[in-house]
Amino acid sequence: MLGRVLLGLSGSERMRNLVERAPISRGIVARFIAGDETADVVRAAADLASAGLTATIDHLGEDTLDRAQAERVADAYVELLAGLRDAGLTEVAEVSVKLSAVGQALPGDGEKIALDNAREICRAAADAGTTVTLDMEDHTTTDSTLAIAAELRGDFPSTGIALQTYLYRTEDDCRRLSGSGSRVRLCKGAYDEPVDVAYQDKADVDRSYVRCMKILLGGQGYPLIATHDPRLIEIAGSLAARYRREQGTYEYQMLYGVRPDEQRRLTQAGETVRVYVPYGHEWYGYMMRRLAERPANVMFFLRALASKR
């Protein structure tokens, strides 16, 4: 219940102002966010690479309602990709993009604006020697995001897409996207979705995750297994063996600051592990969703926040 409350508060301007002013916030944010600037996240990616980990980097920001801001976000990604190239990191680091951050939610031709901005980012990624994965957001954007991904893959075939197993539709989407050359990030989902489109019970979401893993690992694409759940990680390993998947034909993905010991354990076992690394000033919505996923973090943060008011 507390987690659902936090998800609701992720869109609250009043709570955002309170959290951003609280001195305790920055210390907690540093656990999940690599920093504010490009140089900060490039250093974080280099640190991960030195530990044998790969990275996918997200410039934080979503629900952009201003075209100029959407273009600034695209420019920030181009700058980031240049920084990764100059640091020699593009073989081990890619970028993740929320289409709402690059204009998808703009009235009228928002989808076209998002496509144009995403195409610019994909072109910069290709020039730098890496690629892009499109994040999935709330269910109202799913069809638009999949359509934009299909357009981008025409020119940039390695463009990845995230799918969320709490949505009823995701098994069918996995079947459509399990072919050769496809890159699909499978995650549970982190938005507060209604019962008519999404499973509400954790066990149902987990069962859906396993069914979707079977489709992707049994397919011809490159699955990105994004979970911190020990049981699902174990099942993923078993399914990889069942479908005779060699290490390097799939990967695990985990969030920056979450289960770093498990990230290292999998890497030492020969698995490819990619860490989702967010950075930037617009960290509030992202952080609230991360807290909502882990009740212990929620309680710690709220107690600390209350003590500093």
Image (cartoon, helix red, strand yellow):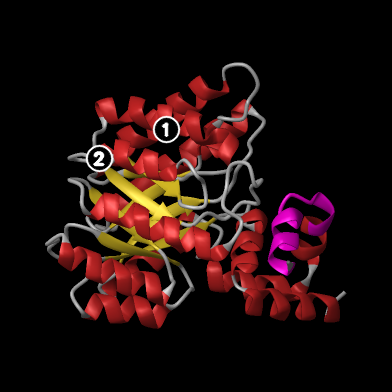
Which image quarter is the C terminus in? Answer: bottom right
Front-lying residue, 161 or 83: 161
In this image, 159 relative to 292: left or right?
Answer: left
In the depicted structure, whether residue 194 falls above or below residue 65: below
What residue is rendered at 44% in x and 24% in y? 116
Q: Amino acid at mark 2?
A: Ser
Magenta segment: 2-15
In the depicted structure, whether residue 183 falls above or below residue 153: below
Disc with the residue nearer the chain's start (2 vs 1): 1
Q: Amino acid at mark 1?
A: Leu
Which of the 4 image quadrants contains residue 242?
bottom left
What residue is rendered at 58% in x and 42% in y? 197
Q: Nearer the viewer, mark 2 or mark 1?
A: 1
Look at the image and say whether residue 63 sits in the magenta stretch: no
Main SS, magenta region, reads helix
Q: Which residue is mark 2?
A: 158
Which of the 4 image quadrants contains residue 284?
bottom right
How many residues crowd around disc 1 within 10 Å: few (fewer than 14), some, or many (20 or more)? some
